[in-house]
């Protein structure tokens, strides 16, 4: 299994961000982007998962929660770690996908379209709302300007929607856009919509790919635009 991301790579942009009051109330920590600031590929997920561990409130420094052991040897979602894509299954799958396509951790910067855990009625993740994507997009735009990736790989419907809405590009069905590169003129990048790792096994066959074929298609698109 790949190593856990380096906590020192957290790219804290606005430590006490309060643009979405509802998310402030339900989050434990803001899950900032992490990885190489010189990456050729930026991977954008939808929103952090809750994970395990007691809840606490992030300090103004954005470095440590007020309660709980931040160094506990267990797996937690981004809401607890303060880093994007660190839940056990999604984190492993997305990194295995890119490594199989020839892009290791040093080639990637990983973040989310919405950086706070959106809590549903049952305490688990709900889908981020359009206003939450809009409120958080300035952070994503800042990250793109910092990293200057050639490709922004959006994993899932909401991450893809965040970029296409900014570019005023309509999205009539997410699956139709998977592996179809989009020239984002305003952002100066190529967006490459991909299946969310949690649903890859469900939807990949409907697109006509087995695992090997999907990895090869991802690698081909990345190599063509990096």
Image (spheres, helix red, strand yellow):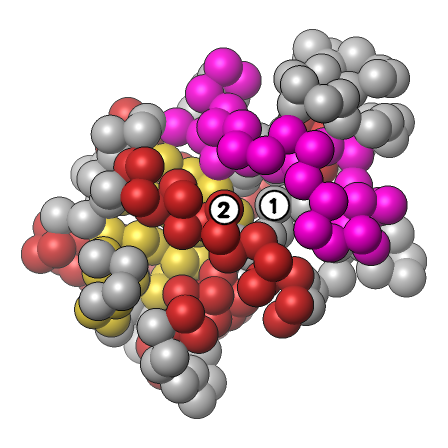
At 69% across and 10% down in the image, what residue appears? 71
22 or 77: nearer the eye?
22
Callout in the foreground (2, 1)? 2
At 66% across and 18% down in the image, what residue appears? 61
192 or 32: nearer the eye?
32
In the visual, does 188 lie left or right of 12? Answer: left
140 or 73: nearer the eye?
140
Residue 82: horizontal and vertical position, in percent?
64, 29
- The residue that mark 1 highlights is 115
> The magenta stretch spans which residues?
7-35
Q: Mainly helix, strand or loop, the magenta region?
A: loop
Q: Residue 45, relative to residue 33: is it above or below?
A: below
**Pointer 2 with pointer 1, Cβ within 8 A:** yes
User: Residue 42: which quarter of the image?
Assistant: top left
Q: Residue 151, relative to residue 83: is it above or below?
A: below
- The residue that mark 2 highlights is 139
User: Residue 55: which quarter of the image?
Assistant: top right
Q: How many marks?
A: 2
Element marked by disc 2: helix
């Amino acid at each position: 299994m790949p190593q856990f991301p380096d906590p020192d790579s957290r790219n804290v942009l606005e430590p006490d961000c309060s643009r979405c009051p509802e998310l402030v109330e339900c989050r434990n920590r803001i899950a900032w982007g992490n990885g190489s600031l010189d990456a050729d590929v930026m991977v954008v997920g939808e929103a952090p998962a809750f994970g395990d561990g007691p809840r606490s409130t992030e300090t103004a420094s954005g470095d440590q929660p007020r309660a709980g052991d931040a160094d506990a040897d267990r797996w937690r979602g981004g809401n607890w770690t303060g880093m994007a894509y660190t839940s056990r299954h999604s984190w492993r799958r997305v990194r295995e996908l890119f490594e199989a396509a020839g892009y290791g951790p040093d080639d990637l910067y990983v973040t989310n379209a919405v950086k706070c855990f959106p809590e549903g009625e049952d305490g688990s993740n709900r889908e981020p709302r359009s206003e939450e994507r809009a409120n958080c997009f300035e952070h994503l735009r800042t990250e793109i300007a910092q990293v200057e990736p050639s490709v922004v790989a959006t994993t899932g419907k909401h991450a893809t929607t965040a970029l296409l809405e900014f570019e005023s590009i309509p999205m009539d069905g997410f699956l139709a856009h998977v592996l179809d590169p989009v020239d984002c003129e305003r952002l100066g990048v190529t967006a490459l919509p991909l299946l969310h790792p949690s649903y890859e096994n469900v939807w990949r066959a409907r697109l006509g790919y087995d695992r090997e074929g999907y990895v090869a298609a991802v690698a081909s698109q990345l190599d063509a635009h990096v």
